[in-house]
Image: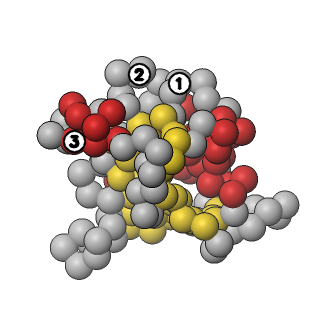
């Protein structure tokens, strides 16, 4: 694994999906993925899947309880592909999804129809754009 990013909902009243739906949709998209369920009482996450494509590096997508956070670890192409997939399975434009890094140093708004290239080209640095000032409704 080389790089880790997250897809988050930015308001506490929104969520993406529960662990079972996450795994079901992952198996539809990547039929040969390896799925794992976790006891959230013992682990910080409740589900994850691993994809080991023949033509690229292995990547891992982890679901956290509450459905507001999914982390993605792998190569940059696989990370962007997984971020696009997360947006595709949630086409509702009212669901606000951000792609961010573990340090929360920046973000890309994942809008419906976003491409893998736009996941990175839309990156906004938080050192230049304070998300707490620019999006106060998201961080109440």
Disc 2 designates what residue? 92
Which residue corresponds to the image point at 26% horizontal and 57% vertical from the top-left? Answer: 65
Closer-to-camera residue (21/118): 118
Q: Is residue 139 above or below residue 89?
A: below
Which residue corresponds to the image point at 22% horizontal and 41% vertical from the top-left? Answer: 139
Alpha carbon distance from label 2 to label 1: 7 Å
Q: Is residue 93 left or right of residue 112?
A: left
Alpha carbon distance from label 2 to label 3: 21 Å
Alpha carbon distance from label 1 to label 3: 22 Å
- Give the numbered dot on residue 112: 1
Closer-to-camera residue (57/32): 57
Disc 3 designates what residue? 139
In the displayed image of the protein, which residue is found farthest to the top?
A: 93
Q: Is the residue under label 3 in contact with that under label 1 (CB below 8 Å)?
A: no
Way the structure is coloured:
secondary structure
**Residue 125: horizontal and vertical position, in percent?**
51, 47
Q: Residues within 10 Å of mark 2 (few under 14, many from 20)?
A: few
Q: Is residue 91 above or below residue 107?
A: above
In the displayed image of the protein, which residue is found farthest to the right?
A: 55
Which residue corresponds to the image point at 24% horizontal and 51% vertical from the top-left? Answer: 66
Mark 2 or mark 3, which is nearer to you? 3
- Image quadrant in which you'd find residue 98: top left
């Amino acid at each position: 694994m080389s790089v880790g990013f997250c897809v988050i909902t930015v308001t506490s009243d929104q969520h993406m999906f529960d662990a079972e739906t996450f795994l079901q949709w992952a198996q539809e998209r990547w039929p040969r993925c390896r799925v794992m369920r976790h006891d959230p009482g013992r682990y910080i996450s409740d589900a994850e899947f691993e994809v080991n494509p023949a033509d690229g590096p292995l990547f891992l997508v982890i679901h956290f309880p509450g459905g507001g956070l999914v982390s993605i670890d792998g190569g940059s192409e696989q990370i962007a592909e997984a971020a696009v997939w997360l947006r595709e399975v949630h086409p509702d434009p009212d669901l606000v999804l951000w792609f961010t890094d573990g340090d929360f140093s920046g973000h890309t708004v994942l809008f419906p129809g976003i491409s893998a290239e736009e996941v990175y080209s839309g990156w906004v640095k938080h050192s230049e754009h304070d998300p707490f000032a620019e999006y106060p409704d998201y961080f109440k």
